[in-house]
Amino acid sequence: QVQLVESGGGLVQPGGSLRLACAASGFSFSMYAARWYRQVPGKEREYVAGVERTVDSTNYADSVKGRFTITRDNAKNTVYLQMNSLKPEDTAVYYCNTFIVRRDYWGQGTQVTVSS
């Protein structure tokens, strides 16, 4: 079955960097777009970034543009989110997402905390 497993979260100081990874299995990863979302308790899940089947087409939320970079390695069935110049307001649980045949699939999430 479709599985998405995130990793790479943690505690980082403001201005620091983290790289999240999402390992996909159970489907033809290279055929589908992949996205990162984030969620803070009590708020709706927020779109962060997306990448189409190739890294030539990417999209970002205004709040992360210029600081975050989404990439994918289709040979490794993995999508990455490089996060630089992190701010306290980036603190959230980050989720990997893909949409296959009219259904959304989500990973379990990885916590990112930006704090001094």
Image (cartoon, rainbow, N blue to C red):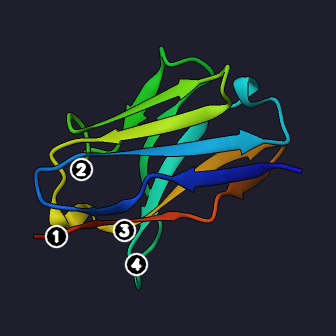
Identify the mark nearer the N-term, 1 or 4: 4
**What is the number of the mark on residue 92?**
3
Measuring from the top left, give residue 44's x and y in whole percent: 45, 73
Q: Return the residue at label 1.
A: 115
Question: Which of the 4 quarters of the picture holds residue 93?
Answer: bottom left
Q: Judge depth for marks 3 and 2 and give the one in front.
A: 3
Spot the residue most to the right: 1
Specify whether 25 is left or right of 9.
right
Q: Return the residue at label 2.
A: 63
Measuring from the top left, give residue 38's x and y in whole percent: 43, 61
38 over 7 or under it: above or below: below
How far apart in space, not on screen, are marks 4 and 3 (Cα)?
A: 10 Å
Type of amino acid at the residue the image marks with label 4: Lys
Q: Return the residue at label 4.
A: 43
**Secondary structure found at label 4:** loop
43 over 103 or under it: above or below: below
37 over 17 or under it: above or below: below
Type of amino acid at the residue the image marks with label 3: Ala
Q: Judge depth for marks 1 and 2 and give the one in front.
A: 1
Q: How many marks?
A: 4
User: Are there few (<14), some (14-19), or many (20+) residues within 10 Å of tag 3?
Assistant: many
Type of amino acid at the residue the image marks with label 2: Ser
Measuring from the top left, give residue 49's x and y in whole percent: 42, 41
Question: Which of the 4 quarters of the picture holds residue 30?
Answer: top right
Specify whether 112 is left or right of 54.
left
The answer to which of 115 and 34 lies nearer the viewer is 115
**Secondary structure found at label 3:** strand
